[in-house]
Each structure stands twice: as C-alpha cells, then as structure tokens.
Image (cartoon, grey):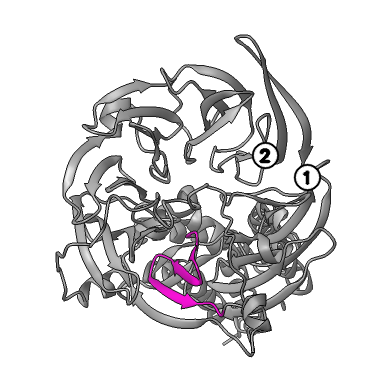
Amino acid sequence: MASHPSPPALRLWPAFVIVGLQWFSRYGLAYFNPDLINFGVLGGVAAGALLAVWWLFFSRATRLERFSAIPLLILFMMLTTQLLHESVATGMMGMMFVVVSIPVTSLVFLVWATLMRNAAANLRFGAMVATLAAACLGWTLVRTGGIDAGANAFFHWRWSPTAEQQFIAQLDDDRQEIAQLDHQAAAPAWSGFRGNQGDSAVSGTTFETDWQNHPPRERWRRPVGPAWSSFAVSQGYFFTQEQRDQEEMVTCYRLADGEPVWQHADQTRFWESNAGAGPRATPTLADDMLYTLGATGRFNALKARDGTVVWSRDITADSGVEAPGWGFSCSPLVHNQRVYVAAAGTLLAYDRANGEPVWQAEKDNQGYSSPVWCTLDGVEQILLVSGYGLRGYDPADGKTLWSFELPGLGIVLPKILNERELLVSAGSSQPLFRLEISRDGDDWQVKQLWESRGLKVYFNAVVTHGEQVFGFDGRIMAAVNLNDGKRAWKGGRYGQGQCLLLPDQDLLLVLSESGDLALVGADGTKFQEFAKIPALQGKTWNHPVLIDNLLLLRNAEEMAMFELSQKPSKSAEASP
C-alpha cells in the first residue's frame, strides 16, 4: 500500500517576526510611551491580520490547512462570543474578547505550528483544529475584574468568587450606632472630594521622609465593598460609599479603629465591566448633613449622626439625563443654602433643607466631573467640565456666563489659580490649558494663555506648587512650568494614581494605581522619589485623605489607615 507523503515543513520565521512585533506593539509600546496605548491595541489586532496573510500565502501549509484555518477560527470565535462571561463580553466597550484573544491566539497558533512543523498531515490538521478551539473557547472559563489604565484586564476563573462576594460572605455586623458629632463644631477635617479647599493640598505639619527608619505605621485594615469613592472625615468618624450586592451603601466608620458605626442602603446597583460595581462619587459633609450621589442617580441628604434620610432625589428623573457609560460620578457641592450636583454634564441646584429643585442648567449628556465654586473677575460662579468643555454658571439661576470648548470626555476638575486664571483639561489624556477669564460688563472673554501636551491627565486632577504644575501624564508623573506649560520633568511609573500635595515640605504623596504609596519631590528641576512602600492590594483609583498625620486609603476591595511619623518641631528639638 502506498504511503501518504508528509506535508511540507512550515516556513516559520515570518510568523516569529509577526508575533514578536504583535506582542511588543500590544504590551511594549505603552510601557515605553503610555500615549501609544491605542496604537498598541490596534497594532495587536493588525498583526493578527498580517499573520493570516502569512498563513495563506507564505507558510507552505497544505491547501486544506491554509483554507480551513481562518473559517474555523471565525466559527470558534462566534461560538465563544455566545458563551463568554458578561464581564468579558462587554469589557472595553464590547471589544475585550477581540483585543485580548487575537494576540494570545496568534501566539498559541505559532506554538502549534512550531511543534507540528514536520508532523504527519492528519495529526497536524487535527492538532490545528484542537488548538484553535482551545484558544477561543478557553476564554469562556474566565471573567474579568476590570481593566487598568493600560487596558490590561484582570482575569480570574469564572467560578471564583469576586472580592465583593467574599466581603459580603464574611459580613456579620449590621450595627446602627450614633456618631457623636457636634454640629456646632468647626468645619469638617475633610469635607469631601479632594479636601476642604478641593485642591488636594495638606499644610500645617511635616513628616519624616526616611521611610526605612520611620515607615508609615498601619493602624488598621479592613475589607470594603466596591466603589471609587474617597472619604469625608469629621470628629473621629469617616464616611464613604460602597456596593454590597444589590444595595448601594453610604457608610460611617470610626477613624480610630475602622469599625462600622452606621449604614444607609438604597436598592440599586450599577456595574460596568471596565471599572466594576459601585458608586463613583465621594460624600460631601456640611454642618450635620451628608450629601451623596450614587452611580445610578440616587441623590441623598442624610443626617451624619445616624444616616437618617432627610430627603432623597432621583437626578435621572429630575434632569432627563440617563447615567453615562461609567455611571454618575459627581461629588456634590454645598454652598450656603443650596447643594449642586451634575447629572453627567448637566448642572442641577437643589434646596439644602428640603431637596426641592431650584434650577437646571443647559443639558449636556456627557461628563464625569464635579462642580467647583469660585470667584472670577469679582463674580461668584460655578464651574463644571462636561462633554462640551468648561462652562461658568450663574449660581442664582444656572445661566451660562461663559464657555470654553475642550476635547475629551469631561472628567477632570479645573484648578483655580487666581481671580482671573485657571487650569483645565477635560481629561481622557487630552491637553492641559491655562485660561484667563475676564469681563466687560455682562460680556465675558476667555483667553487661552497656553496649551500643553506635556501633562495629559486622564481622570486625576493636577496640583500646583510654586511655578510648577504636577500630575499624571498618562501613567507617569510629570511636571510642567506654570508660566508656559513646558514640561520640566517626567518620571515614576505609578499608573493612573492619585496624589496629595504637601507644600510645607515640597513633596507629593503619591498613591499608585497598583496600591503603592510613594513620596516624590514637588520641584521643577527633576523627578526624585524619596520613599515607596506597598499600601493596598488591587487596582486603586480612589483619592487619598490626610488628617494631621493619619492617612486614609481605599480601593474597591479594602481600606486602611496609616500613621505617618511627624517631624519634631524646631522648638521641640531645641528644648533640653
């Protein structure tokens, strides 16, 4: 009986070149230059198409192998899309499976081709079918815990419990106590998002920078429900928001030991694959009241002592604006007898006492920023960055005083420099602008002083110190000159983290996206990291809070408090 001739050996070197370039494009480009992340993603997909060209025309595969591989791959991918976990199917705006599977499938296919290069025809073909099936259907076994700023997904086995499920399973305390708050006391230690002045700056104390000999001391640590909220702090208590299954929570804890005091629950849940479940905003504390906005639009006024509901609104119903893709993210603004909140990019004003709507500004369906109160050219106004750009509103009636169009999604808060100038970016890695705002009677003028691509923030606002502006340019810390916007330095890979300015020591306290805590110099000469320690586990997008020498940190899985070693005062050093 005549034997079947063996198929020709596969020509592999072009495939090695293509797959190597594919993985460098997808994962290497963004490491060296975070601005190229989108090109890297597209490059990974494009290289997959180039690998298909190699296979069809230059691989020396048999006709059966060449003309069956791609239809089989398409068939297996279509079947897989019907079986994917929701987090993978909807991740990256529905493109996660394509984006992550093509480089992996290309690599697996190359491994098959290398191992089966000289194999018998039937064995090689059968192994090819099995390889393509496994490379696609294997994705049905996993779920994702979201993505980081570099579009890298956090994969887990599909059947493994989420951090939220593990947290809920161990809950055994639903206590409802009274927070011993004196509403006649001074202003809160930390009233809400980015502090009392909304500038992420903490003055009045100095800390040891030698963390080898004087490391931050962990006071307590506990799990928490998912949310991207930060904290409000007053009189030994702190307040935050979190998700627990189908309940969106506002919670109060003791600062000293992290033990729960009271909780308020709304029967609602927001979830999307990229960022996960839970609220996105931070509570605002004013007098004896706590104002909170949930990701689906539930706007509450609660008594800070025990969480009793004073009034509650649905901003979706009030404004006619549906929750944007990543949920309502505005932290409420309180001023005098009104509280202001943004439904996406639409600003709303409510009466603080009873929650009755006062006015609604012009509608804008896009935006994730929060309103800022300021005085520009002698006129009090409210600023809001939205999908359109930046607008200044009259607090009396919500009418637009002036506007400046910006590229981007409308995420970042503006930074007020003085009574006529400010810094603003819409975020989503768009340029930073310095603007001068002036008026002649009722006519407002907006003058662009400079535009800088040296500091392109995504969702984290900038801080200023001296003649420098500091922030995250992509996933790397950077400084630009306040006078002309030119970059002074760039360094330190902290992902899309957050930072606090310590002006008394010319320092930045940086909380990285991976949960590390670092001390970085706040000067315009060079990047310098003085110390760094691991602080939290998991993706960390939440803004840190510093009260005296107590540092509150959290992410979507855990929260902790650290005590920073304070430097002795000069008078103490001089005393015998």
The amino acid at mark 2 is Leu
Relative height, residue 444 to residue 381 (above, below)? above
For the question of whether residue 155 can be seen, the reply is yes
Query: How far across and down, in percent of the image, does residue 122 sit?
Result: 54, 79
Q: Neighbour class for label 1 at 10 Å: few (<14), some, many (≥20)?
A: many
Q: In which quarter of the image is the N terminus?
A: bottom right
Residue 534 included in the magenta stretch of the image: no
Residue 4 image-quadrant placement: bottom right
Residue matched to label 1: 482
Residue mark closest to the camera, 1 vs 2:
2
Element type where label 1 sits in the image: loop
Residue 356 x, y percent position in the rendering: 24, 27
Residue 298 spot, x, y in % from top left? 26, 41
Q: Nearer the viewer, residue 569 or 176?
A: 569
Pick the residue in front: 254 or 321.
254
Q: Which quadrant of the rendered structure holds the C terminus?
A: bottom right
Name the residue: 63% across, 26% down.
Answer: 405
Disc 1 and disc 2 in contact, CB within 8 angstroms: yes
Quick one: which residue is furthest to the front in this view? 576
Magenta highlight range:
542-565
Gap between marks 1 and 2, in whole Å?
Answer: 10 Å
Label disc, if present, on residue 417 of the rendered structure:
2
In this view, 446 is above or below 329: above
